[in-house]
Amino acid sequence: MMTITYPVKNGIYVNMTNRCPCACTFCLRNNGDSIYGSDPLWLDREPSVEEICDSIDSWDLTKYNEIVFCGYGEPTERLDDLLKVAAHVKSESDIKIRINTNGLSDLIWKERTAPKLSGLIDTVSVSLNTDNKEDYFKTVRPKFGIDSYDAMLQFTKDCVKYVPNVIMTVVDVVTSPEEQERCREICESIGAKLRVRPFES
Ligand code: SF4
């Protein structure tokens, strides 16, 4: 059984793809084969736009605050499909829509992608992870190389123009207070807000 949507607190989370251009050292996908086989978030195949819309429509959205594109994978790997689903949701509900992303959409698509989010996405949450490109490259291990950090920051800066709420996240415990402060300065310089997320083992 594959899980396309699932509730987390006040949100409905959407799991569209397991593809990702990164190999973060902390990724849940690295937890070993035993998890993949039995984990319902590991997709046997990618669901179609219609299947995703049907799955979202099966929930009573009046009971939730947010639709969140997340999952075991990078949702912007399917950006056009994601936006079709978002348009469908917007056509029948005023629920807020968020994307949790690694921020590398421009590198995946080889174009500036933030303008496409305009009017469809209410919140973008980008994983900042660290305050410098070298540590980012070591931890996130993006296939696009060392300059991925700069592209992620540029994407986030662009998002500020097109999306009402832009957040960057770092994980508590694995970043020092000093590093978090420098991350806060980076966020402020591009117009985003920093959120320090609790460590989840
Ligand atoms: S960006 Fe997300 S899905 Fe991709 S490897 Fe990192 S934690 Fe995993």
Image (tube, rainbow, N blue to C red):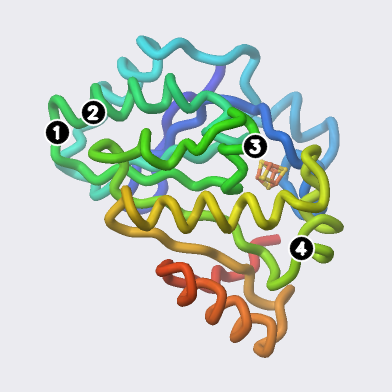
CA gap between label 3 and label 4 equals 15 Å
Residue, disc 4? 133
Residue appearing at x 86%, y 57% in the figure: 138
Picture coordinates of residue 137 (x, y %)?
81, 55
Contact, CB < 8 Å: mark 1 with mark 2? yes
The 10 Å Cα crowd at callout 3, few under 14, some 14 to 19, many 20 or more, is some
The residue beneath circle 3 is 107
Separation of disc 1 and disc 4 at Cα? 39 Å
Judged by depth in the image, the label closer to the viewer, 4 or 2, is 4
**Residues packed near mark 2 inside 10 Å, few (<14), some (14 to 19) or many (20 plus):** many
Label 2 near ligand 1 (CB < 8 Å)? no
Residue 39 spot, x, y in % from top left: 66, 31
Tag 4: residue type?
Answer: Lys
Comparing marks 3 and 2, which lies closer to the viewer? 3
Q: Nearer the viewer's eye, disc 1 or disc 4?
A: 4
Instruction: Give the left or right position of residue 190, taking residue 43 as reference.
Output: left
Q: Which residue is identified by label 1?
A: 93
Q: How crowded is mark 1: few (under 14 residues within 10 Å), some or many (20 or more)?
A: few
Q: Disc 3 versus disc 2: distance between alpha carbons?
A: 27 Å
Give me the C-alpha separation between circle 4 and circle 2.
Answer: 36 Å
The residue closer to the viewer here, 109 or 140, is 109
Where is residue 62? Give x, y as percent. 15, 40
Q: Is mark 1 on a helix, strand or loop?
A: loop
Q: In which quarter of the image is the N terminus?
A: top right
Q: Mark 4 and mark 1 in contact (Cβ < 8 Å)?
A: no
Residue at the spot of label 2 = 89
